[in-house]
Image (tube, grey):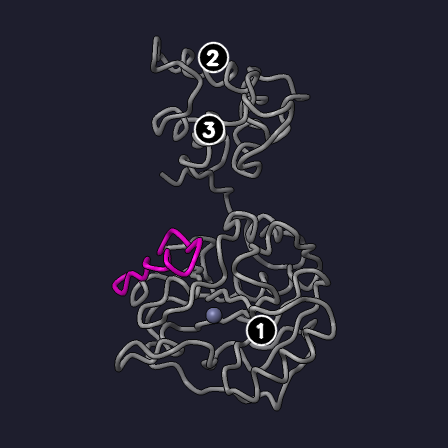
Amino acid sequence: MSTNWIEKAQRLGDGSIGGAMDHPSVPGRVVWHTTESGTGDDAFTSVAAHLIRVAAEPHLLYDPTTDRLGQYGPLKQSARALRNDGSTRTNRVGKVCIQIEVLGRAAKPFTKTWKPGPNYRAMMAAIRSWNIPDTFPAGRLATSGADATNRPRAVWMSKGGHYGHANIPGNDHWDPGSIDKAALFEAAPAGKPGTGTTPAKPVVDLSNLIAAARRDPGLPQGGTTHKPDVLVVEKALVAEGLLPAQWADGSFGSRTVEAYAALQRRYGFSGADANGIPGQTTLGKLGRQHGFTVKA
Ligand SMILES: [Zn+2]
């Protein structure tokens, strides 16, 4: 059953913001925005009213500091937070095009300070009820206005998943900024009792992992660069008997580098190919054996 109204969400406006989708045979998707405002209840109230006044309502308004969630319209109908791409009504692409305005600013990625709670998990369960995968098919989000150039039209017109406003063709905003994409999914694990979904495999980003393996050993003890990615791999190294459990801390420090080098040797590599910096082949194999997928 797909969710149209999230029971936990506060109703905003009159419940009617858009209409039928223009491209319902294209897979469903989510678009993340930031409101470029402050957070907290006063901001929530004033932004909620402002978005109605300017007729730019998303489906959902979310405060990442308080877990407060509001909903303007049913998920199966269109919202109004995107600009058209020429003659394409971007708000109406997909079986659903669920738009989320997150209170905050693109320049301060909200996943650094947020406190997702039950309302966030209810929102993600509603998104998954439309079979929207836990992926960002357009890839990179923008780190600044000048960087907002990754808007692949062919991807947008065909692929389901999550997008930032910065990824939408015909638009020029760069929100939601450089948020931690994996954290969005990890904060609401799929397959929890009562959500009616099957567990999604964790996704490990190879480039994140390599960056962590190069940087973390030089940080103060326990320093992390890409903690969610590293933790998944460290747990697999623990299960392989190569890393003491106490070092599975999300920091790809020198112990983890040593453990990964031992894994590379176990998989038949030597010399520079067993230097403890993860590569596609060894990480892919580790993932197949320990239930995660690798994003190259
Ligand atoms: Zn936006």
Q: Position of residue 1 (x, y in %)?
A: 54, 70
Image height of 17 relative to 30, above or below: below
Q: Is mark 3 within 8 Å of ligand 1?
A: no
- CA distance for labels 2 and 3: 16 Å
Q: Position of residue 90 (x, y in %)?
A: 36, 76
Q: Is mark 2 within 8 Å of ligand 1?
A: no
Identify the residue under disc 2.
262
Q: Earlier in the sequence, mark 2 or mark 3?
A: 2
Identify the residue under disc 1.
60
Depth order, front residue of 168/242: 168
Mark 2 residue element = helix
Identify the residue under disc 3.
289
Image height of 224 relative to 131, above or below: above
| The stretch drawn in magenta includes residue 150 | yes
Image height of 220 relative to 106, above or below: above
Residue 37 is left or right of residue 167, and the answer is right
Residue stretch in magenta: 138-155
- Circle 3: residue type: Gln
Image quadrant in which you'd find residue 150: bottom left
Q: Position of residue 4 (x, y in %)?
A: 56, 76
- Circle 1: residue type: Leu
Q: Earlier in the sequence, mark 3 or mark 1?
A: 1
Q: Position of residue 102 (x, y in %)?
A: 58, 66
Image quadrant in which you'd find residue 24: bottom left
Magenta part, dominant SS: loop
Q: Nearer the viewer, mark 1 or mark 2?
A: 1
Q: Earlier in the sequence, mark 1 or mark 2?
A: 1
User: Few, some or many C-alpha atoms within 10 Å of disc 3 (few <14, some 14-19, many ≥20)?
Assistant: few
User: Few, some or many C-alpha atoms within 10 Å of disc 2 (few <14, some 14-19, many ≥20)?
Assistant: many
